[in-house]
């Protein structure tokens, strides 16, 4: 069957009398068209007999969580540590209380409500509400399939699909311990050591990385100094001479010059020459020690110790 035949068949189906009757009597009827790119789009909406065209809509694709495998979507992480809860069954007593059962009943019926004409359409950006709808989609799908098998042709003012699903909702009070709680209890002895050892494992690998990093940097610096020992010796000797000998000697010569007030400083005329000569003698002693060091003869066996010439 080609695309044109499929389009004609769909057009005849949409124009059928029974389908038009359903649109007029349904509380909510959506007409969704699947485009050639297999992307659905909302083409029309009928609510309580009134039709709305060109309605803006957003269709979200998601993978349906399977509650049979304890799958659900949540903004909060699942807390598996139930050791802090009283072991006498306080968790299950609280879940079996009438207040908790009424809350679950209200949540289940609210998920099946598609539209309320009395309150109008409500637009919400609450992600928790959206996730609740997604988590309850599996149960809703099973309930709709179960009702659709024996669902007769609807007459005017008869029960809608959503009303039938809502009336079939039963008390969700738990009579036995939850499978999820039992699973968490049995798996917690296995999961708990990983939670306690996580910090130790992180510290261990961080320490190993720091040691390896120091070794790599040390070997790299060692190879560089061995291969360029003469050049590095010359550079070190030049900087030592410029910054620790020549510059300080120039400052001392300027301060002990014949100028009585160098840079406007009033110095002691008797103490100034004495201190100047003392510091010059210390600089000459330091210069003699630095000049006696051979910076360029650092062999592969002596790259950490500088040779002192006699």
Image: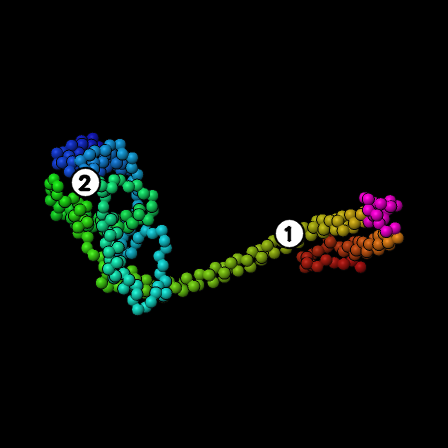
Q: Which residue is mark 1?
A: 224
Could you say which is closer to the camera, residue 54 or residue 268?
A: 268
Query: Mark 2, residues whose alpha carbon is within 10 Å: few (<14), some, or many (≥20)?
Result: many
Find residue 65 and report its horizontal and vertical position in percent: 29, 51
Whether residue 234 is visible to the viewer of this picture, yes or no, is no
Identify the image quadrant of the C terminus: bottom right
In the picture, residue 122 is in which quadrant? top left
Q: Say which residue label 2 marks.
A: 27
In which quadrant is the N terminus drawn?
Answer: top left
| Residue 255 forms part of the magenta stretch | yes
- Dot in front, 1 or 2: 2
Q: Residue at x 17, y 46 (%)?
A: 163
Give, as a single range, the part of the protein colored magenta: 252-269
Give the structural element (helix, strand or loop) at label 1. Answer: helix
Residue furthest out toward the bottom: 88
Q: Position of residue 34 (x, y in %)?
A: 25, 36
Q: Quadrant of residue 175?
A: bottom left
Could you tell me which residue is drawn at 26 percent across and 36 percent down? Answer: 42
Q: Nearer the viewer, residue 285 or 67?
A: 67
**Numbered label attached to residue 277:** none
Cα distance in 3D space between marks 1 and 2: 82 Å
Residue 271 lies, with reference to residue 83, above or below; the image says above
Is 95 a magenta residue? no
Residue 11 pos. (x, y %): 18, 32
Asked whether disc 1 touches disc 2, contact meaning CB atoms under 8 Å apart, the reply is no
Q: How many C-alpha atoms fall within 10 Å of the one at disc 1: few (<14), some, or many (≥20)?
A: few
Left or right side of 297 for 268? right
Residue 145 x/y as whole percent: 18, 48
Identify the element where label 2 is drawn. loop
From the viewer's perspective, tell me whether residue 241 is left or right of residue 141: right
Q: Residue at x 75, y 49 (%)?
A: 243
């Amino acid at each position: 069957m080609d695309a044109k035949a499929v389009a004609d068949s769909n057009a005849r189906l949409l124009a059928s009398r029974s389908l038009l009757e359903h649109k007029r009597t349904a509380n909510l009827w959506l007409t969704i068209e699947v485009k050639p790119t297999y992307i659905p789009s909302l083409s029309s909406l009928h609510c309580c007999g009134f039709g709305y065209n060109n309605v803006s809509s957003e269709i979200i694709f998601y993978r349906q969580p399977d509650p049979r495998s304890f799958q659900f979507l949540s903004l909060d992480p699942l807390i598996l540590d139930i050791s802090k809860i009283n072991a006498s069954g306080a968790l299950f007593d609280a879940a079996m209380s009438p207040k908790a059962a009424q809350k679950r009943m209200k949540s289940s019926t609210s998920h099946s409500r598609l539209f309320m004409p009395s309150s109008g359409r409500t637009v919400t950006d609450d992600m928790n509400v959206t996730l609740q709808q997604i988590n309850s989609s599996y149960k809703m799908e099973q309930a709709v399939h179960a009702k659709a098998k024996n669902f007769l042709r609807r007459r005017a003012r008869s029960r809608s699909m959503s009303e039938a699903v809502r009336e079939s909702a039963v008390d969700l009070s738990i009579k036995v311990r939850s499978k999820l709680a039992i699973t968490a209890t049995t798996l917690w002895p296995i999961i708990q050591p990983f939670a306690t050892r996580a910090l130790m494992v992180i510290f261990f690998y961080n320490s190993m990385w720091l040691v390896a990093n120091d070794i790599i940097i040390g070997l790299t610096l060692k190879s560089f100094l061995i291969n360029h020992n003469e050049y590095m010796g010359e550079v070190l000797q030049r900087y030592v001479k410029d910054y620790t000998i020549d510059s300080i000697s120039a400052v001392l010569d300027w301060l002990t010059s014949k100028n009585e007030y160098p840079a406007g400083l009033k110095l002691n005329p008797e103490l100034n020459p004495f201190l100047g000569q003392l510091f010059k003698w210390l600089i000459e002693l330091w210069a003699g020690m630095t000049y006696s060091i051979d910076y360029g003869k650092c062999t592969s066996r002596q790259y950490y110790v500088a040779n002192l010439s006699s």
